[in-house]
Amino acid sequence: MQQTETARPAVPPSGLSPSRAGDFLTCPLLYRLRVIDKLPEPPSPAATKGTLVHAVLERLFDHPAAERTPERALALLRPQWERLLGERPELGELFPPAPDSPAADTGIGTGIGTETIGEQLARWLAEAEKLLGQWFRLEDPTRLEPVERELYVETVLDSGLKLRGYIDRVDVAPTGEVRLVDYKTGRAPSRDFEGKAMFQMKFYALVVWRWKGVIPKRLQLVYLGGGGDVVSYDPDEADLRSVERKLLALWETISRAVASGEFPATRNRLCDWCDHQASCPEFGGTPPPYPLPILPLPVVPAARTVEDPTGDARMSTMSKES
């Protein structure tokens, strides 16, 4: 990876999403490389498979309830893959031709070659089909009418901290209770890690509460990997106030790191899958020169000890307009 020889000005981060908060808690250097240095990351088969499955589940609800069948979901798989390829041509690199094998037409209009007429792609799509089949065993889409899918949510706390993210699905019961749902293509975590997994949903619940004034009745994670599982949690105001305090403390820690340029690398179980080992001292690499921040971060709460926020109704509609 080619690195610049001099530091460059940079616009500092403007807020937090669940993913970026998780990055900093996992490894501050990873947060820096993604958010401040903005180093590119190649597409991965696993992450792209998750994106594809999410797209199919989103589009499935375009159809009338009676047509939301496993067969319909499978019929959507290749068209959604075509759409993703059209939007991100670099995804074609996931399935290169086999050595000494002529590129074969996959039949999806892109000319991507794999050995034996798309063997790699076919196997990957079969894995996505399995995840979709698992979802139908966990939920019945003929009985669901989401009010929102892939909903972008954003709010600015009184402190000035901006929180943002995308919610996979928002359900509203006839009685008005709100349920936030997120699909996960991995397997469900052990009980020891359920709190960290639910942090993302509590984050979204806090955003919805501060944005709409409604505390979601239920937070639900639908795991499609392994044997499949559904993990639910019912938050209350005390939960969300606690998450808010912890996020403010986390943002203060990020603010100090941005000001000092000190983002230590932290070895963890995800290091083997990290794309930035060449820039990580833990693997003999060197980070790029630190870009000079030219603006202060938008909020500096009162000093406090940072905590890991992962440790721990009425709405007739959800609108993308605040």
Image (cartoon, rainbow, N blue to C red):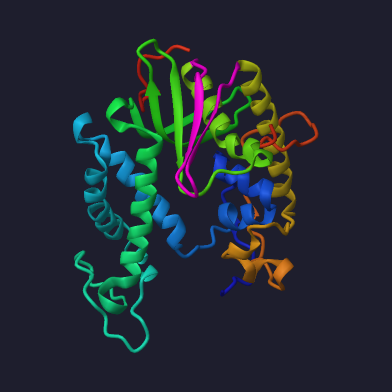
**On the rendered image, what quadrant is the C terminus found in?**
top left
Q: Position of residue 301 (x, y in %)?
A: 71, 30
Q: Which residue is at the front of the view, 254 or 22? A: 22
- Residue 197 is situated, as x and y percent measured from the top left of the image, at 59, 39
Asked whether residue 297 is in view, the answer is no
Residue, far bottom: 100
* Residue 288 against residue 259 in the figure, above or below: below
Q: Is residue 70 above or below residue 283?
A: above
Q: Residue at x 37, y 86 (%)?
A: 99
Would you place residue 170 above or below residue 42 in this image?
Answer: above
Please tell me in which quadrant of the rendered image residue 147 appears: top left
Query: Looking at the image, which is closer to me, 155 or 275?
Result: 275
- Picture quarter containing residue 162? top right
Tell me the quarter of the picture where residue 45 sits: bottom left
Decide if residue 258 is on the left or right side of residue 114. Answer: right
For residue 304: magenta?
no
Residue 78 can be seen, yes or no = yes
Q: Which residue occupies 60% across, 58% down?
A: 33
Count the marks: 0
Residue at image position (70%, 70%) is 283
The one of 88 and 129 positioned closer to us in this rendering:
129
Q: Report the front residue among 7 and 111.
A: 111
- Image spot of residue 158 (x, y percent): 60, 22
- Say whether residue 268 is left or right of residue 176: right
Residue shown at the point (75%, 36%) measured from the top left: 307
Q: Give the magenta-colored segment's residue range.
A: 213-236
Q: Does the magenta run of residues contain 223?
A: yes
